[in-house]
Image: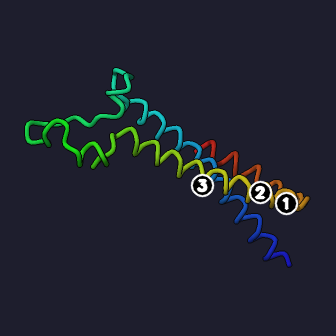
Amino acid sequence: SPAGMALSVLVILLLSVLYEAVKMGKAVLLRRALLALPRSLSQEALTEPREGPSGPAQGSPSLMAFPTFFPRWFWFHVGQTLFHVVQVVLGYMVMLAVMSYNAWIFLGAILGSTLGYFM
């Protein structure tokens, strides 16, 4: 039906816009992750937490066995990973819709991608 086709094209258009938004969000998160990295990229700066005067004693077995917190850059990396998974899923969904070989669906995907990039 024409209403069903219009709804399908609208959904594909919105999925394409969302795909572009996720792609841009991933780029912003990458920039923040790079800014959160320590200036020194030595192994100690990446793995050892900074301890204040009230921190556990040096050589504490509980600290050595399991770190209680992760550095800030690690959480940015987790966020980037989640954004990547969402981006891949959305990309495959749009690709499968385009592979229906329907010209209107194809135009909806192209227009959505264009709008998403423009925004």
Query: Viewer-proximal residue, 6 or 78?
Result: 78
Q: Tell me residue 95's x, y (percent).
A: 79, 54
* Label 1 secondary element: helix
Measured in 3D between alpha carbons, the distance from the residue under mark 3 to the one under mark 1, in whole angstroms, is: 25 Å
User: In the displayed image of the protein, which residue is found farthest to the left?
Assistant: 53
Position of 81 relative to 35 (above/below):
below
For residue 89, which quarter of the picture? bottom right
Q: Are marks 3 and 1 in contact (CB under 8 Å)?
A: no
Q: Are marks 1 and 2 in contact (CB under 8 Å)?
A: yes
- Crowd class of label 3 (few under 14; some 14 to 19; many from 20; radius 10 Å): some
Query: Viewer-proximal residue, 61 or 117?
Result: 61
Query: Viewer-proximal residue, 114 or 67?
Result: 67
The quarter of the image holding the C terminus is top right
The numbered dot on residue 108 is: 2
Query: Viewer-proximal residue, 104 or 90?
Result: 90
Q: Tell me residue 1's x, y (percent).
A: 86, 79
Measured in 3D between alpha carbons, the distance from the residue under mark 1 to the one under mark 2, in whole angstroms, is: 6 Å
The numbered dot on residue 2 is: none
Q: Give the labeled residue for mark 1.
A: 104
Position of 47 relative to 76 (above/below):
above
Q: Tell me residue 25's x, y (percent).
A: 51, 45
Of the residues shown, which amino acid type is indicated by label 1? Trp
If you read the primary sequence from the N terminus, does the residue marked by circle 3 or circle 2 appear first?
3
* Label 2 secondary element: helix
Closer to the camera: disc 3 or disc 2? 3
Of the residues shown, which amino acid type is indicated by label 2? Gly
Q: Image point 62% across, 47% down: which residue?
A: 20
Of the residues shown, which amino acid type is indicated by label 3? Val
Q: Image point 39% across, 23% down: which residue?
A: 41
Q: Is residue 106 left or right of residue 85?
A: right
Q: Give the labeled residue for mark 3.
A: 86
